[in-house]
Image (cartoon, rainbow, N blue to C red):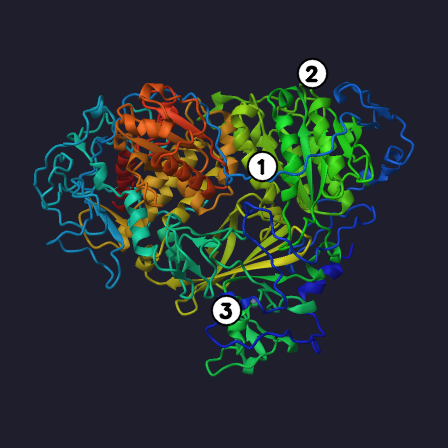
Amino acid sequence: MNQQGHMASYGQPQPGYQGYQQFAYNQHTAGVPTSQYGPYNGPVQGYEPTAAPQGPLRPTPGAPPTSLPPSTAAQSTAYNQYGQGDIQNGPAMTDQMQRFPVSQSYMPGGQPIAYQQYAPPPSNAQHLPNQMAAMQISGSTSNAPPPISQSYGPPTSHRQTTASFPPTGPAVYTQYSTPLQNISSSIPQAGNPPQQPFSGQTVPASTFTSPPTSTGLTGMNLPPPPGVSRPTAMHAPPLPGQSQTGFPPSQPPTGHYPPQPNHRPAAPQTGVPGVVPGPPTQGFQVHPTQPSQGFIPQQNGSFGQMRAPQPNYAAPYTGTPSYNSQPQPQQKRLDPDSIPSPIQVIEDDKSNRGSEPFSTGVRGQVPPLVTTDFVVKDQGNSSPRFIRCAAYNLPCTSDMAKQCQVPLTAVIKPLATLPADEAPPYIVDHGETGPIRCNRCKAYMCPYMQFIEGGRRFQCAFCSCVTEVPLHYFQHLDHTGKRMDYYDRPELSLGSYEFLATVDYCKNNKIPNPPAFIFMIDVSYNALKSGLVHLLCEELKTLLDYLPREGNAEESAIRVGFVTYNKVLHFYNVKSSLAQPQMMVVSDIADMFVPLLDGFLVNVNESRAVINSLLEQIPEMFGDTRETETVFGPVIQAGLEALKAAECAGKLFIFHSTLPLAEAPGKLKNRDDKKLINTDKEKVLFQPQTNFYNNLAKECVAQGCCVDLFLFPNQYVDVATLGLVTYQTGGSIYKYTYFQAQADGERFLNDLHRDVRKVIGFDSVMRVRTSTGIRATDFFGSFYMSNTTDVELAALDCDKAITVEFKHDDKLNEDNGAQIQCALLYTSCSGQRRLRIHNLSLNCCTQLADLYRNCETDTLINYFVKLAYRGVLSNPTKTVRETLINQSAQILACYRKNCASPSSAGQLILPECMKLLPVYLNCVLKNDVLQPSAEVSTDDRAYTRQLVISMDVAETSVFFYPRLLPVHKMDVDSDDFPVAIRCSEERLSKGGIYLLENGLNLFIWVGMNTQHDLIQSIFNVQSFGQIDSAMSALPMLDNPYSKKLRSMVDMIRAQRPRFMKLIIVKQDDKMEVLFKHFLMEDKSASGGASYVDFLCHMHKEIRQLLS
Ligand SMILES: [Zn+2]
């Protein structure tokens, strides 16, 4: 309605700042630690943005109004925190409201038409079209037991993987037969000239020569002494088919390989398996399609734009030799110890950077790796927990950016959980006129704004526009030009903080109502039979005590509602004044409406008895159901309509078991077809089968209706379609295939607990502003966008990250650097409207070497994964894989060409910060989404795709390269974990026990020769043969090994957003193939290359680009 006025109201600075009373900021002096911000800005709201704590949430004063607004039609009016880009998310839905008169007669207090004592299961209940029957549920009247506070383990989850991977043959690890001659291991060694292109810096390159010298890989280029003969591989086990396991050539057979000099390191290589050199070769084959200067520019994200000729790597690797027409180089082995080791990099970073706090005061600093435990001190730039970049030193020009092909990308996690020892963002209140912003670009006040004219005006760091400082915000400057209150105001001295938003930032200029949670439970046959309904209803009785609360509020402002459904929907009136809940059945699912307003969404404490009674009765009511068909679209519609009617944002928790085959809007058919894999039509499997859910998602976003989906399928349910609304509303999806309450209950309940309790912002819009020269051009994650700048999120929780790509629109300069400001406007769980601001400033460079020296591969991979996972919607997976390989090869080739010191072209030289790019990229390429093995279901692929798309850097990092810990080496006297080992079968000892986790899966692998003592200590049985691999929890034994291992499992689970079910795998057991699927450095059952092979392949690609 008043959208115009609304837009104008904060599109322009508000007049009338005069006379506004200045806040009583304490006059602190410089150097005040951030923790002292508490007293400013009035009482700190006690906002607690950390993830759901394990105990009861904190109480807080001042809960916002919870009263239901008059039941006028909810306007899905667009709104926007930014003075541009109107969002129109569909017309207002008034249908349901018009029909309220009908439903009135069924409401409690009225004269129910079809009022009856509940007797038959609702599925047999009689329904009148376009009407509903109200039923008094009179089953057991037991009062709810007092809420029991259960202590839940930290949340996490589990990627469903079919348990039957094809047995792999004997693993082949070290063999490779590409003409790669010199992967010179760049180990600092006495007497070797260090490759030190940049003085005073760590050497940014890792060079690898085939005969590796040691495991420590850090950039030093060994001068390749020709002709040194190498011992043949000594350590590698003899493997079948060695000579046939080469990597498919990346070029069409040409009859000759790009020849290479035959360089090998001179250093003594005792006992290190190396490479048997191939015939010496000289000179490169010049590839006609490769320009000698630079590389064919490729648009990031545009698949299919490949240089020719196509490398045929991307076709699923079959393991068959493909060098037929090429001169077969002599057999060589590349020692896996000689190539860059993820573990080494992770451990080095831990020891180099884990001890000192990371202070964000210096522009363009690369933070420690996500695997390093470090403390962050916010000194004017956001913590890397909120924003991480692939490059911290951006190229000044778009030409440079094109040349290097390094994506300029940031992974932003606006509501990230911080560790207990780091202060959550302070809340700033600029008063009734709202946050101070730049007049032109609307950037929010931040440390980069430059105050001028004695403090009366400030110049925007983003657009350079000069804006008047409102009187109430005026402050004198010190002799350095800094405001005197610099350290007293978070928005002047910190990278991250929150503003209280004014009514101008609210939908329809109205303070929002607190959000609502609606639990929508499938009560069809499968859901009952698996034990789900019973388990869930039992759990909800206590779980509802843990709804998110604002700060120290005594109770949550969130209201709850309940719906059950199969082919029809059952709404429940749980109004506190009722003695028993009432059920209202809506069988006209073609045109969904909500049959009751009053009594549907209630305060848990007020209605506790009625709610508990309902939860008691639901499993009984439907216990005998024979109904197997379900609807799905109308379920979301019902929740959406309920939120509209209540004029609030909220979240639907949908617990669903089957493909919705029943006649209804959004009805689906089984269209699974695995024959499409590796065809041009494969993308169809990832696309929704109907537009219905796209449109529904749009409506949900407009209302701030987030949909969380818990799936319990026994067969194909079309995750790609069912998950769409979840995906576009910022919701979470969980899948428990073949769910049985007994076996999977723990995982489900832990996930549910975390999901219900976690910090979440509703009805959000995120906007990323940048300084002149770059702009955000692309976004990846779970959200909806109706224009090119505003990321609309029905909700955003603490686990969700959004990956942003930036492109040049002008030149940058080294002096100014580049600034990024992310502003998230959201409604808190109590209905408070807030803006969370994150600021980050980056360096800019004119030398590519500076770019390569300040990169982060984990973030780069996060971007690549999301690019690829979006790409599969419109491209064959083969094309997507090729695109990733191609862009990565260009990144590395550009480094080699422009930054590395001159050396033999036969050497693979990698930038130090990117030396893990090949291994991580290979993990991405081999993942089920891009290269499925035969046993991975279509739903699992769609599910993985959806999960990964909103992962942060830490999650993608461990998901694609799992953590593998040697349990038998753990120090029971220390809190530390044993140092991880590389994910390869050859690293496993038959006498060892290993723990593997990737954030979704958790295995303990037991070698058959493990000492009996250790087996006894951990499994409480005497021998390997007696270990029960069906156990899902380790026995609680009173010895240090058992305690330590169980504590490790607990700690690992606590680190991950989803609960991981423990799977015990015995060596040579049938489950072992599942475990081996995660040994990422090995060749995969689906044809994915081993790390060694892939590195050779990348080398070839790079050489091809350089030649
Ligand atoms: Zn500006």
> What residue is pinned by disc 3?
493
- Amino acid at circle 1: Leu
> Label 2's element?
loop
Give how far apart the Cα atoms at labels 3 and 1 are: 38 Å
Q: Identify the image quadrant of the N terminus.
A: bottom right
Q: Is residue 715 above or below residue 331?
A: above
Query: Quick one: label 2, few (<14), some, or many (20+) residues within 10 Å?
Result: some
Is residue 690 visible in the rendered structure shown here? no
Q: Nearer the viewer, residue 222 or 807?
A: 222
Asked whether mark 3 and ligand 1 are closer than 8 Å, the reply comes as no
Q: What percent of the width, then of the height, locates residue 1060?
A: 47, 34
In primary-sequence order, the first of circles 1 and 2 is 2
Marks 1 and 2: CB-CB under 8 Å?
no
Q: Is residue 850 above or below residue 576?
A: below
- Amino acid at circle 2: Arg
> What residue is pinned by disc 2?
626
> What residue is pinned by disc 1?
752
- Amino acid at circle 3: Ser
Give how far apart the Cα atoms at labels 1 and 2 are: 27 Å
Give how far apart the Cα atoms at labels 3 and 2 are: 63 Å
Q: What percent of the width, then of the height, locates residue 693?
A: 65, 34
Q: What percent of the width, then of the height, locates residue 836?
A: 58, 58
Q: Is residue 691 above or below residue 478?
A: above
The residue at the point 70 percent across, 78 percent down is 18
